[in-house]
Image (cartoon, helix red, strand yellow):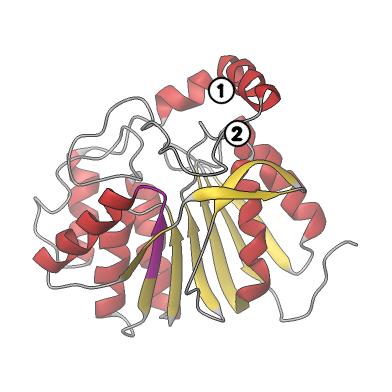
């Protein structure tokens, strides 16, 4: 979850929803993992300089004040450029985003310029979801924003996952920028629940891929999902993992 305004250095407190309580073991593991992960967390506060930000905005014909603040948990400019790259070339029909914010505006604008596809964006903070629609409307853009509480568990992964409704049957581009690591360092591994919906040639983008937690997630995905070609891109401040679906067959390791 990120906004057009300044973001605090700490993740927002989890809303008190049914099923959102972490176990004692998960809490202790998070505290331990923070000691390992803190250098990457500090690096993630940098989102790119003004020139890099303006270059993104020029590509998609947005005003220079459309993204007043980057960094502090926001997407970095490398990720934004790579999202625009994919939309320009592939012109996806259905884009699903986990963790709304700056990327939502960039995706919606790029889709309006290249193919007219639709964005489905999910976030755990309900008031923020309502604000996102207003923000995009200021730029004459629209998307389907949905509140997705974090009260689902998957026995294959620790942590909590979104309750997702109204997903498209097929996904051409999946952008994973949530849940926050403070839920659990490995919680984004549950994004694989959506991989069967990825169309042949479709792409997965995992933000913050340089962090130790996401590196562990990537190793497991590579072993399990053989019909995806995964690649780590380290040029941005936070690291990016991409996964292109090679074909429509189910080549998962059983």
Q: In the drawing, does residue 226 fall left or right of residue 11?
A: right
Q: Tell me whether circle 1 and circle 2 mark residues in contact (CB < 8 Å).
A: yes
Ranked by sequence position, the earlier of labels 1 and 2 is 1
Residue drawn at 71 percent across, 80 percent down:
247
| Image quarter in which the N terminus is found | top left
Q: What label sits on residue 185 in the rendered view?
A: 2
**Numbered label attached to residue 192:** none
Q: Secondary structure at mark 2?
A: loop
| Stretch in magenta | 120-125
What quarter of the picture does the C terminus occupy?
bottom right
Q: Nearer the viewer, residue 28 or 56?
A: 28
Q: Residues within 10 Å of mark 1 (few under 14, many from 20)?
A: some
Q: Residue at x 22, y 65 (%)?
A: 59
Tell me the chief SS of the magenta region: strand
Which residue is depicted at the point 39% across and 63% down? 121
Can you give x and y, in whole percent of width and height, for residue 250 in the image?
80, 75
Residue occupying image coordinates x 43% and y 35%: 14
Mark 2 crowd level (few <14, some 14–19, many ≥20, 10 Å Cα)? many
Q: Is residue 171 magenta?
A: no
Q: Which mark is residue 37?
A: 1
Horizontal and vertical percent position of residue 62: 14, 63
Residue 172 visible in the snapshot: yes
- Image height of 218 relative to 57, above or below: above
User: Taking 53 as reference, is 186 above or below it?
Assistant: above
**Marks 1/2: CA distance?**
9 Å
């Amino acid at each position: 979850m990120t906004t057009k305004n300044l973001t605090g250095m700490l993740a927002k407190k989890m809303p008190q929803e049914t099923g959102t309580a972490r176990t004692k073991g998960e809490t202790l593991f998070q505290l331990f993992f923070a000691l390992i992960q803190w250098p990457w967390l500090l690096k993630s506060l940098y989102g790119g300089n003004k020139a890099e930000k303006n270059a993104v905005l020029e590509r998609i014909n947005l005003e220079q004040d459309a993204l007043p603040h980057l960094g502090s948990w926001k997407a970095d400019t490398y990720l934004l450029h790579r999202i625009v790259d994919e939309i320009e070339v592939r012109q996806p029909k259905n884009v699903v985003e986990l963790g709304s914010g700056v990327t939502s505006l960039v995706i919606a604008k790029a889709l309006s310029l290249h193919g007219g596809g639709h964005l489905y964006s999910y976030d755990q903070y309900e008031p923020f979801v309502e604000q996102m629609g207003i923000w995009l409307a200021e730029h004459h853009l629209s998307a389907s924003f949905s509140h997705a509480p974090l009260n689902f568990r998957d026995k294959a992964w620790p942590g909590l996952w979104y309750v997702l409704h109204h997903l498209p049957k097929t996904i051409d581009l999946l952008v994973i920028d949530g849940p926050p690591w403070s839920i659990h360092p490995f919680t984004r591994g549950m994004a694989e629940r959506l991989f069967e919906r990825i169309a042949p040639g479709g792409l997965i983008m995992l933000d913050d891929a340089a962090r130790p937690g996401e590196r562990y997630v990537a190793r497991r995905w590579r072993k399990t999902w053989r019909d995806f070609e995964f690649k780590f891109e380290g040029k941005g401040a936070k690291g990016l993992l991409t996964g292109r679906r090679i074909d429509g067959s189910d080549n998962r390791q059983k």
